[in-house]
Amino acid sequence: MLSESDFQVNQLLDILRAKLLKRGIEGASLDVPDEFVHSGKTWYVEAKLKQGIESAVQKKIVKLIKDSKLKVQAQIQGEEIRVTGKSRDDLQSVMALVRGGDLGQPFQFKNFRD
């Protein structure tokens, strides 16, 4: 994003977060650096969307699931974590556990089947 002042860059970021929220994407999934770049008369910032789960966060999630003593198995597959279990209630409790954990990024859950 490019603008003439840092205040306008902040306003553009707020607009972007609002548009993302309307599309169902949380603002925390946007990776914005703390410092804006100032070059001549313009300010700019390069904001990136987080895709996938970093390996350190993946390990924390798997440890969190195993420490919960639920009857599910968690596997790391690339940038995703696959959780399998017999009971739908166990899977829903894992989803609530991951959402409730302070892991620094939002999560999406897909392919939920019996």
Image (tube, rainbow, N blue to C red):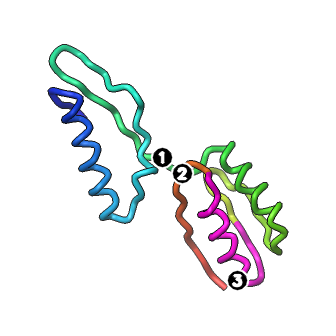
Mark 1 = which residue? Answer: 50
Q: Name the residue rendered at 32%, 64% in the picture.
A: 23
**Residue 27 picture location, percent across and down:** 40, 52
Disc 2 residue type (three-letter):
Gln
Residue neighbourhood size for the residue with mark 3, other residues' Cα within 10 Å, grouped as few (<14), some (14–19), many (≥20): few
**Residue 2 picture location, percent across and down:** 21, 31
Cα separation, mark 2 vs mark 1, equals: 8 Å
Q: Is residue 9 left or right of residue 62?
A: left
Magenta stretch: includes residue 101? yes
Residue neighbourhood size for the residue with mark 2, other residues' Cα within 10 Å, grouped as few (<14), some (14–19), many (≥20): some
* Numbered disc 3: secondary structure: helix
Total numbered labels placed on residues in the image? 3
Mark 3 = which residue? Answer: 89
Please tell me whether mark 2 or mark 1 is closer to you in this view: 2
The image quarter containing residue 91 is bottom right
Residue neighbourhood size for the residue with mark 1, other residues' Cα within 10 Å, grouped as few (<14), some (14–19), many (≥20): few
Q: Do tag 2 and tag 1 residues touch (Cβ < 8 Å)?
A: yes
Specify the segment rendered in magenta.
83-102
Disc assigned to residue 75? none
Disc 1 residue type (three-letter):
Lys
Q: Name the residue rendered at 42%, 57% in the picture.
A: 26
* Numbered disc 1: secondary structure: loop
Relative to 79, say whether 39 is above or below. Answer: above
Q: Name the residue rendered at 22%, 42% in the picture.
A: 11
Mark 2 = which residue? Answer: 105
Relative to 1, say whether 86 is above or below. Answer: below
